[in-house]
Image (cartoon, grey):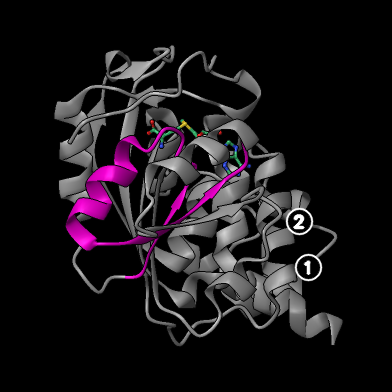
């Protein structure tokens, strides 16, 4: 695949632009995504189409969301056969439920690192429309996403994402694969939405707010960290000791706590 570059384009820091230029890595990432004809694929941040070209070669067509006006104009010139459907928009404020309405999509992207966590949260409510997600993120963020209870990196991101997805870190990508090279190592993560289980948060907003409060002061006992949500009786109803710390509790314990809190608000 020949890579064409947008001449004179200077990578924009505010859009987290680090372009993949090393063909070995571009191919390896595309193979991990494994696009097939007939797949409905949507890329976040196609940039100068490094991954886009590979994916279109394998799947025939795809959609992409790009915020940078100059890159969007460049991208429009690159696929005259209409194989790329471009949405020029901010992926953070895009109404994902509407974009994915009635579809089952495969999402991928070398995400701008400055907005990766908010973007993962923005996609969460639309997870039932998603077949899988393949993202390149800072290695440190992927470690937090897949961390188990008790580990230092286990936190809000781990609980909220593990509740909804089965996640696998696939491989690391070195800074030298990009122009400009980022300061940190990146990792590719595969995220597959879980079938909706029996233990569901009855109120998503309570679940989300309770998890955020629990990890805001991760050294505190849960009794103190989430006192706005639950009293001692609520903890026993959820079957969780109020002396526990957030970092030791698994995802199910958070759902039980959130559901006890939601019932108290009804
Ligand atoms: N996919 C390309 C590659 O691998 O070379 C570019 C990756 S670069 C890390 C991130 C891309 O996301 C850039 O093209 C950037 O302009 C775009 N981007 C940044 N913020 C965005 C946003 N909020 N919505 C959509 N695209 C965004």
Name the disc covering residue 230, or none: 1
Residue that appears at 21% across and 31% down: 2
Task: Give the residue at mark 2.
Answer: 226
Return the mark for residue 99: none
Q: Is residue 45 left or right of residue 133?
A: right
Decide whether residue 34 is among the magenta residues: no
Q: Is residue 191 left or right of residue 232?
A: left
Q: Quadrant of residue 135?
A: top left
Q: Which residues are magenta?
A: 40-68
Q: Is residue 18 visible?
A: yes
Question: Given contact means CB atoms under 8 Å apart, are the residues at marks 2 and 1 in contact?
Answer: yes
Q: Residue at x 74, y 51 (%)?
A: 213
Residue drawn 54% across the image and 14% down it: 10
Secondary structure, mark 1, is loop
Q: Position of residue 126 (x, y in %)?
A: 55, 71
* Label 2 crowd bin: few (<14), some (14–19), many (20+), radius 10 Å: many
């Amino acid at each position: 695949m020949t890579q064409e570059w947008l001449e004179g384009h200077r990578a924009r820091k505010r859009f987290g632009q680090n372009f993949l230029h090393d063909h070995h890595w571009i191919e390896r990432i595309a193979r991990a995504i494994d696009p097939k004809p007939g797949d409905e694929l949507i890329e976040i941040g196609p940039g100068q189409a490094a991954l886009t070209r590979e994916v279109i070669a394998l799947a025939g067509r795809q959609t992409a969301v790009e915020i940078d006006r100059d890159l969007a104009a460049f991208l429009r010139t690159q696929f005259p056969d209409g194989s790329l459907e471009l949405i020029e928009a901010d992926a953070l404020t895009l109404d994902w439920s509407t974009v994915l309405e009635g579809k089952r999509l495969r999402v991928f992207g070398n995400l701008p690192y400055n907005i990766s966590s908010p973007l993962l949260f923005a996609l969460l409510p639309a997870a039932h429309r998603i077949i899988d997600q393949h993202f390149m993120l800072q290695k440190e963020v992927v470690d937090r996403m897949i961390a188990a209870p008790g580990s230092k990196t286990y936190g809000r991101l781990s609980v909220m994402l593990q509740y909804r997805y089965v996640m696998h870190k696939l491989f690391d990508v070195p800074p030298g694969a990009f122009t400009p090279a980022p300061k940190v190592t990146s990792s590719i993560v595969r995220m597959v939405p879980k079938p909706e289980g029996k233990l569901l948060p009855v109120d998503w907003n309570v679940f989300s707010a309770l998890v955020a409060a629990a990890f805001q002061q991760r050294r505190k006992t849960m009794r103190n960290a989430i006192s706005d949500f639950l009293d001692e009786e609520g903890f026993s109803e959820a079957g969780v000791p109020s002396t526990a710390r957030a970092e030791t509790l698994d995802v199910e314990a958070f759902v039980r706590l959130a559901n006890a809190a939601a019932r108290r608000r009804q």
